[in-house]
Amino acid sequence: MPHSATQLPSPSSASALGKGLPAPGAPLADYRISRRVLILSGLAVVAAAVSTVVAKILVWLISTVTNLSFHLTWSSADATPEGHHWGAFVIVVPVVGALIIGLMARYGSEKIRGHGIPEALEAILLGRSRIQPKVALLKPISAAISIGTGGPFGAEGPIIMTGGALGSILAQQFHLSAAERKTLLVAGSAAGMTAIFGTPVAAVLLAVELLLFEWRPRSLIPVAIAAVAATALRPLLLGAGPVFPVAAHASVSGAEIGYASLLGLLVGLGSGVVTSMVYAAEDAFKKVPVHWMWWPAIGAVFVGIGGLIEPRVLGVGYGVIHQMLRGELVGQVLITLAIIKALVWAVALGSGTSGGVLAPLLILGSALGAFLGQWIPGGDLSLWALVGLTAMMGGTMRAPLTAMVFAVELTHDYNVLPALLAGSIAAFAVTVLWLRRSILTEKLARRGQHITCEYSIDPFELARVKDVMDPQVPSVPAHMKLTDLAERIASGDPVLAGHQATFVFDQERRLSGIVTRGDLLRALPDATENPGLTAGEAGSRPLTVTYPDEPLYDALNRMLAHNIGRMPVVDRLRPDHAIGYLGRSAILSARQRLHEEEHHLSSRQSAN
């Protein structure tokens, strides 16, 4: 028998060939999960512990650099740039920090540039979830220098990137798969965010809405465990309780929910403006005729000038956020703060320095919400500041559920949840209709990478093999001469010519092999020398098969794993009895069906 390049493994070895690929006939279940999730969960706890420690180090570094830069004292006590004694020379402080960051980026790792989340997305989607160890070291240091010298950023982006790097490094040490590395990378990120803000549920939601690109137990369980572990460790290292405790509001009324929706729409417009400003600044810096290493220092000049006008725009600004959430800032100061913060943040971030986006968004949202709330009847400024904060985060990051839960966990003000939902969804609606991409995905798009952020059930998961298979089985007896088979196909046999393979049956009508067009072409030269060569001798054995009630997704994965383009569909009780033919065109028909459901409008007659 001539060698066939399409020689296939038996059904029982299918799962051995492709890791995690169910063998034909595997029991169907709601979820695809294996016991390896227990190993990942254990490693997630380790990643969470390390990320929490790194979060503590990052907070310590930021405070130390802030005290040293603005107050000339060596102390790790909480500090802000306000109250410095530099006078007009305060402009120099952010420039010095930016020069250091530029040097670190050029001679250390360019990955420390930016606000962290796009870099984590890039590592997940394009880098097979591998992040270099030096990024885990340099990212928190660069962020601490940036924020500590007055950069208008937050610590969340850097800790998400750093926690992700730590999770990725841990996964690489245990030689895990790319999918498992992604889970640990995101687990480390979620743990880092939880450690900084004390928001475990929001951290898990952020993972689902922005980082995992799936909703599966194999990833959700370890990520949630990491967030819970970080929550347990946080009081020991960073303190307990909400970051921004406020007096709880009473249950919101229907009118207040309506006003929250309107406020969300307005803040959503502001979100779109801010996103456009950031990338307009980035485009402007690309035209500056100097090496990108110097761009952060140029941007820092604008940061220093903004700090000279309004000192509260410098640094991470958590104290300013808390003041607005308590209703302590009112009037003109709110809009002034929002405008100057937006300008210096957009320029600094566009320059490619290191820092996060979340804290600036919280300041901008709170300021806009409180400012616009002055004209809303009922409620109070603290309520509208919280709604504005949620709307700005939900609209800009395209993560409305994360924003809503994040705001509640930051304040422990659970009664306002309906208003926060209304505001965040309204802002989300504005930005997705207005802008093609978010502030997080636009950076990747500018590098030639496209990300789709919509989740839906794969049509191949819903369809069964029997829904698309061809019940006409192209078959010939095993004893048929190969030349006769070639003549039947060439003559346009209505069944054989319409398929790329022919099944071979023995004398008892049992499936014994398959002859593909490739088999036929390779064997025909031998058939001219050996006219007695039969289809059974030229065919491929053993066979890889599928079953009529099997999900099309499993069948497709099996075809990809074995590099084949068609399979026999067999009866479960009689695995040597072929009842259908599954080929590529049949699989594509399932995708076509989904396209029709999405785009073909029903006529009024059919609807009735």
Image: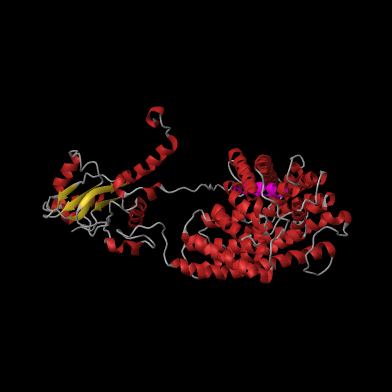
In this orientation, does residue 126 appear? no
Q: Within the magenta stretch, is there residue 377?
A: no
Q: Residue at x 81, y 70 (%)?
A: 74
Q: Position of residue 419 (x, y in %)?
A: 65, 46
Q: Quadrant of residue 599?
A: top left
Q: Main secondary structure of the magenta part?
A: helix
Q: Quadrant of residue 138?
A: bottom right
Segment colored magenta: 385-398
In the figure, is residue 133 to the left or right of 332? left
Q: Looking at the picture, tell me which residue is in the foreground, 464 or 184.
A: 464
Q: Looking at the picture, tell me which residue is in the foreground, 274 or 522.
A: 274
Q: Residue at x 63, y 62 (%)?
A: 194
As displayed, is residue 395 above or below residue 543?
Answer: above
Q: Position of residue 14 (x, y in %)?
A: 32, 61
**Label tally:** 0
Q: Position of residue 528 (x, y in %)?
A: 14, 50
Q: Position of residue 460 (x, y in %)?
A: 38, 49
In the figure, is residue 86 to the left or right of 272? right
Q: Looking at the picture, tell me which residue is in the foreground, 30 or 535.
A: 30
In this orientation, does residue 600 appear? yes
Quadrant containing the N terminus in the rendered view? bottom left
Q: Residue at x 28, y 54 (%)?
A: 547
Q: How is the image coloured?
A: secondary structure
Q: Residue at x 39, y 50 (%)?
A: 461
In the figure, is residue 311 to the left or right of 536? right
